[in-house]
Amino acid sequence: MSQNGIDFLRDQHRTVETLLDAVSSASPTERGAKFDELRELLAVHETAEELILRPLTRAAIDNGNEIADARFAEENEAKQVLADLEKLDASTGEFLTKFESFAIDVRKHAQNEETYEFAQVEESQDEAALGKLGTALAAAEKAAPTHPHPSAKTTTANLVLGPFASIVDRVRDAIKQAS
């Protein structure tokens, strides 16, 4: 049986927190590699949540639309900051200052998801449905873009942009690793 989808997402939140700390504490020369690892996880994690979890939130829980809209707004802000951070030299103080503010927002967003969304979704679904959620989230992450795309401000835009952006992102990542 597949992992409970909410547990899958909570586990990723713990990994994100570890990576946030790793970026903050890395030496200037190591910070870029740690940030790349974090950026990729955030990009695929948030895409999967937008495409798989948010529709379930809207359909399965009271005030689901309000909860999903609030999380989506937080994610759109984070995508923009993440894209801005990508343009900066990770070894600089400017990057670190902007990153520290971003890290606070990411932690708050994760807490909001776990408090206002995950608990209610988990309560509304049986074990089999939560297993299917886990399978769907894992599948969505395999096809998700690996960089933030702030221009994709809706789930529909992510559905249209996602496959192309994923290919472009993976080629860009391969070129960066090769150089």
Image (cartoon, helix red, strand yellow):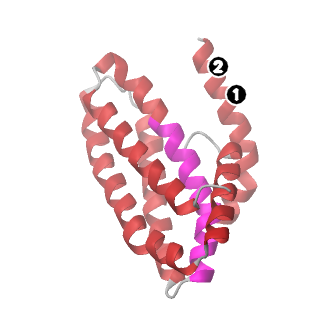
* Looking at the image, residue 144 lies above or below residue 178: below
Percent across and percent down for residue 59 are 63, 82
Image coordinates for residue 144, horizontal then vertical, percent: 66, 46
Q: Quadrant of the C terminus?
A: top right
- Taking the spot 64% from the left edge, 43% from the top edge, the residue there is 145
The disc placed on residue 175 is 2
Taking the spot 71% from the left edge, 50% from the top edge, the residue there is 139
Residue 178 is covered by the magenta coloring:
no
Q: Residue at x 43, y 41 (%)?
A: 84
Amino acid type at image mark 1: Val
Q: Residue at x 70, y 27 (%)?
A: 171
**Residue 12 in the image, given as x and y percentages of width and height:** 47, 48
Q: Which numbered marker is on residue 44?
A: none
Q: Nearer the viewer, residue 60 or 66?
A: 60
Residue position marked by numbered label 1 in the rendering: 171
Q: Main secondary structure of the magenta part?
A: helix
Q: Secondary structure at mark 2?
A: helix
